[in-house]
Amino acid sequence: MFTIDKYVVAESLDQAYELNQNRRNVIIGGMLWLKMGRKKIGTAIDLSNLNLNTIEEDDDSFKIGAMCTLRDVENHLGLNSYFNNLLSKSVEHIVGVQMRNLATIGGSIYSRFGFSDILTALLSLDSYVELHKGGIVPLKKFVDMPYDNDILVRIIIKKDGRSSCYKSHRMSSSDFPVLACAVSNKGNEWYASVGARPGKAVLKQFTLSEKPSNEEIDKVAQDITKLMTFGTNMRGSTRYRRLLADVLIKRNIEEIIGGNHAD
């Protein structure tokens, strides 16, 4: 559990940013992970009055406020329709509805957890994060940036017409993923994002012919997994995860092109 000396509902992002420069202060969202540790917090900074709990759609993109919950993302008709339910499929097995009603997408993406389903899914799209001081940064770059005291304001997903698919493997329905995988396709450009390796998600780009054969899909999946690093923990070994990645990449590709591995 944690203790809080002072609680402040921020009146502006500038105020929240200034408060967050003190390392004893913390931005609070759903507080699901925060409450599992032991921490003495100087000032808890609440962003709930800054109108960051909306999902906006225009002709070019979706803009998801950092205070939107995973449940908001899961149920958004526009996101589900445009991205073939990619984001809803990526969060539907995260513990339960009660947790998804609390967990914020800002906290999930800023933390860059190794087991993050939503990070794996977003990385396969043309996604960006908007930081208060750092500006707009591609998600694939943000994933590898060091942690700092900037504030994640929103996530931006470009509407570039790509097809996408998400799959994960779990020991039980609501457990953390043993491995997570998202694949997307735009023209002759393909992208594979693999998370819970157990490290944070990584993205690889590849190409396929217009009508790839099973042999071509098999080879590209093997080539991608050879470029990735996998590890061992209580949920699976390095070898097991590499085998899972190979299978999930192939299944995602096959679903996008409209077939299956037996065709």
Image (cartoon, rainbow, N blue to C red):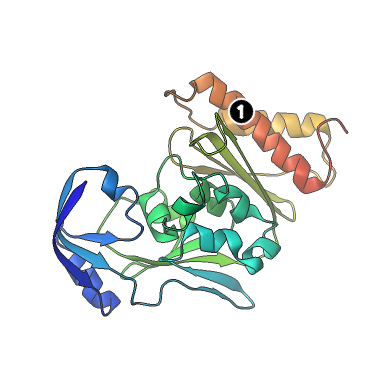
Along the line of sight, the residue nearer the viewer: 119 or 209: 119
Residue 198, x across and y down, in percent: 45, 32
Residue 126 visible to an observer of this rendering: no
Considering every residue shown, the one lying at the far front of the view is 98
The structure residue drawn at horizontal position 22% and vertical position 76%, both measured from the top left corner, is 15
Along the line of sight, the residue nearer the viewer: 222 or 82: 82
The structure residue drawn at horizontal position 47% and vertical position 25%, both measured from the top left corner, is 235
Q: Quadrant of the C terminus?
A: top right
Q: How crowded is mark 1: few (under 14 residues within 10 Å), some or many (20 or more)?
A: some
Viewed as shown, does residue 109 lie left or right of 208?
Answer: left
Q: Quadrant of residue 181?
A: top right
Along the line of sight, the residue nearer the viewer: 229 or 99: 99
Element class at badge 1: helix
Residue 129, x across and y down, in percent: 44, 63
Is residue 63 shown above or below 39? Answer: below
Residue 113, x across and y down, in percent: 40, 44
Residue 138 visible to an observer of this rendering: yes
The structure residue drawn at horizontal position 27% and vertical position 61%, both measured from the top left corner, is 27
Is residue 45 shown above or below 217? Answer: below
Considering every residue shown, the one lying at the far right of the view is 263
Q: Quadrant of residue 42?
A: bottom left
Q: Name the residue under label 1.
A: 244
Along the line of sight, the residue nearer the viewer: 198 or 220: 198
Q: What residue type is labelled 1?
A: Leu
Residue 96, x across and y down, in percent: 51, 47
Viewed as shown, does residue 228 lie left or right of 252?
Answer: left
Is residue 177 shown above or below 85? Answer: above
